[in-house]
Amino acid sequence: MKEMNLLIKELIANNIPFEIWPFIVMGKPTFQICFPSKENCLVDAVSHEGSYGGPQGLIEVLGSVNNDYPNDDVVGWLTAKEAINYFIIK
């Protein structure tokens, strides 16, 4: 969860709105970060046993609002510094 916590700090530092939603994967609690909200989730990030890079503590992102990082599928194995780029509007 270290990278997810760093991503939350990056989102706050960049004044990017988001919501955190808890859920259970393989019997373990985890959470999803949604931009800008769960009801209108344009970009989401997760890190859990079933996500790309999750077992290594890395982040999987779905969606993007950044034209430099187009994404209509999941992108995994990201650090927080890499994942934040999908949340920054360009």
Image (cartoon, rainbow, N blue to C red):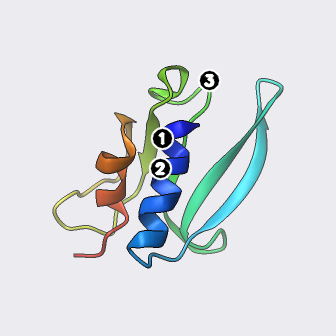
Indicate the secondary structure of the residue bearing disc 1.
helix
Indicate the secondary structure of the residue bearing disc 3.
loop
Classed neighbour count for the residue bearing mark 3: other residues with Cα under 10 Å, few (<14), some (14–19), many (≥20): some
Q: Amino acid at mark 2?
A: Leu
- Label 2–label 3 contact, CB within 8 A: no
Q: Return the x and y of residue 29 as percentages of the image width and height.
A: 79, 36
Indicate the secondary structure of the residue bearing disc 2.
helix
Q: Return the x and y of residue 51 as percentages of the image width and height.
A: 54, 30
Q: Amino acid at mark 1?
A: Glu
Dot placed on the residue nearer the N-terminal end, 3 or 1: 1
For the residues marked 2 and 3, what is the alpha-carbon distance in whole angstroms?
18 Å
For the residues marked 3 and 1, what is the alpha-carbon distance in whole angstroms?
14 Å
- Residue located at (77% from left, 24% from top): 26
Residue 79, quarter of picture: top left
Give the number of callouts: 3
For the residues marked 1 and 2, what is the alpha-carbon distance in whole angstroms?
5 Å
The residue that mark 1 highlights is 3
Classed neighbour count for the residue bearing mark 1: other residues with Cα under 10 Å, few (<14), some (14–19), many (≥20): some
Q: Nearer the viewer, mark 2 or mark 3?
A: 2
Q: Nearer the viewer, residue 42 or 87?
A: 87
Residue 90's place in the image compared with 25, above or below, is below
What number is the disc on residue 24? none
Residue 18, quarter of picture: bottom right
- Residue located at (45% from left, 40% from top): 60
What number is the disc on residue 49? 3
- Residue located at (42% from left, 71% from top): 13
Dot placed on the residue nearer the N-terminal end, 2 or 3: 2
The residue that mark 2 highlights is 6
Which residue, as the protein is rendered here, is positioned at the far right? 27
Quadrant holding the N terminus: top right
- Label 1–label 2 contact, CB within 8 A: yes
Q: Nearer the viewer, mark 3 or mark 1?
A: 1
